[in-house]
Image (cartoon, grey):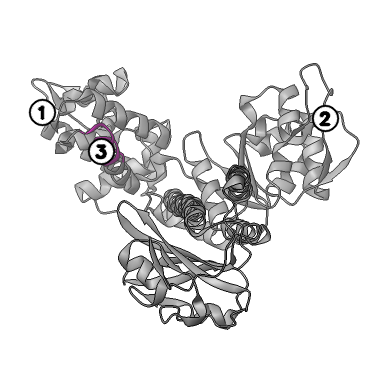
Amino acid sequence: MMTFDANIPNREECHTCSLTFAYKEINLLYEVAVMLTSTTDIHESVEKAMRRLKQHGYLERCALFRKKEDADELELLISIDLEPYQKKMATYRFGEGATGLAAQSREPIVIENIHNNINYLNKMGNISTQMVSYVAVPLMQDDEVIGVISANIGKNSPLNFDEIVRMLTIVGSLFVGALKVQQTITKEKESLSELKTYYKEEMQKDYKFENIVGRSTRMQQVFSMINTVAPTDATILIRGETGTGKELIATAIHNLSRRQNGPFIKLNCAAISETLLESELFGHEKGAFTDAREMRKGRFELADGGTLFLDEIGDITPSLQVKLLRILQEQEFERVGGTKTIRTNVRLVAATNRNLEEMVRKGEFREDLFYRLNVIPINLPPLRERYEDVKLLIEHYLQKFMKEHRKTMHFTKPAMELLLDYPWPGNIRELQNTMERIVLICPDGEIQPEMLSHVLPFNYQKLYMQNDIPVSPSASAVPAKELPSGPITKKTLQELEKESIIQALIDSHGIQTKAARSLGMTARQIGYKIKQYGIEV
């Protein structure tokens, strides 16, 4: 410890009271430690601790400086009894004044009489006549100076300089430790916030309609409709076969709406029994039924301010249809077992693979509810009507599962043709699951048609494998009596297929859908074959 000045003010040494001072010092340090851990605002806690030290008469005008990251210079971080203009002036280079000298020498600096010592620069001004001495203590971490804590000492301070230096060293370490913890927590919060933003953006990328795999005309029409209606609050009914991606479209609608920062709540109405479904939708009060041990909010309440997606809406019972109609009309409901009316602001997106018009005709679905749901209908085409998208989806899921399972493979042309001509009755879900099975079962390298025997239906494999050569499924449309005798080759079958298609088109007067029906093909398949064989229509 470096001490300046020989003119030391009169101080009474009271060795008999040292134990009393030590006891008070421990209590004070305990109070400071409690203050630093009792709030998340560390700056406020440090200021309170400084004022408590002042209150006990240990120091005046305490200040905590920290070293700048890019320079050997100290800047004021926290202080008491300083005006804003004084705080701006309180910066010290290493070696400048007593404060800068403490940082440079890495030792405590004590100025016993500030009124006649050139090392006391008094940048902060306004020295009281009661302020006699000045102490600056360097704060160290990993053998590096990270800051300085300083204070003015009054003539009536109950401690000597050694005790004051020890007190400031301990208190300064507590302050710095608390600040470091707060900095760590702040950085972790910022990191978590950035990760949350990143993952939210990544999730939304998967569900924005422009990133949904699909370039076919039918899907472009769907995307155009979503782009138009998503920003509104209109109720939307998504219709399509199982596996066509209705939930994916619903999520895209939410993420492109004004409610994108609100909750997106999903519920599959077909997966829950009638009694539980009512509770899931509207919530229940404590004691409403046997297992209702506490109040629970329903999906409509949880989705307040956001979007509620009800999948398989055609499976709800008539009694629930009435309650659902009311909430769509009035935007209010009661929990099961409750009497309090709850209002909610929810945008409803429903989906079904059932023929609601037929259900209405049979009395199985309320007509008024159907019209309330069918404000904006979006019809998703099955995969067999999106032939242009099949190859894109195959390649998309192949890349995805190769990356996931760390494998490298590619389809031969015959294998790809086999998959392209498969009708995919389970739509995208079937294609996705099939691609994962292919990646898991097949070895790295080329994927041959015969390797697909474990992933496609047996009847389909049998149709495609004649003389170990993959052929088109529409070859089955060729009458058996027209098949030539002898070995069947792919070229022979293709010629017969082309002739059959031409004849069917002639018989149907060029109407492709009628020709396809007569051959047992889909409109998509016959369109592809017409293009493949260069048939003029």
Q: Which residues are magenta?
A: 397-406
User: Magenta span has 443?
Assistant: no
Mark 1 against mark 2, which lies toward the viewer? 2
Crowd rating for badge 3 (residues with CA inside 10 Å; few <14, some 14–19, many 20+): few
User: How far apart in space, not on screen, are marks 2 and 3 (Cα)?
Assistant: 47 Å
Residue at disc 1, secondary structure: loop
Amino acid at dot 2: Glu
Amino acid at dot 3: Lys
Please say if the residues under marks 1 and 2 sit with CB atoms less than 8 Å apart: no
Question: Which residue was labeled with disc 1?
Answer: 489
Question: Which residue was labeled with disc 3?
Answer: 403
Left or right position of 326 against 521: right
Amino acid at dot 1: Thr
User: Magenta region's main secondary structure?
Assistant: helix
Question: Which residue was labeled with disc 2?
Answer: 285
Residue 371 percent coordinates (x, y):
73, 47
Residue 348 percent coordinates (x, y):
67, 47
User: How far apart in space, not on screen, are marks 1 and 3 (Cα)?
Assistant: 37 Å
Q: Earlier in the sequence, mark 1 or mark 3?
A: 3
Where is 244 relative to 440, above or below? Answer: below
Residue at the location (44% across, 49% down)?
A: 199
Residue at the location (71% across, 48% down)?
A: 304
Can residue 123 be spotted in the picture?
no
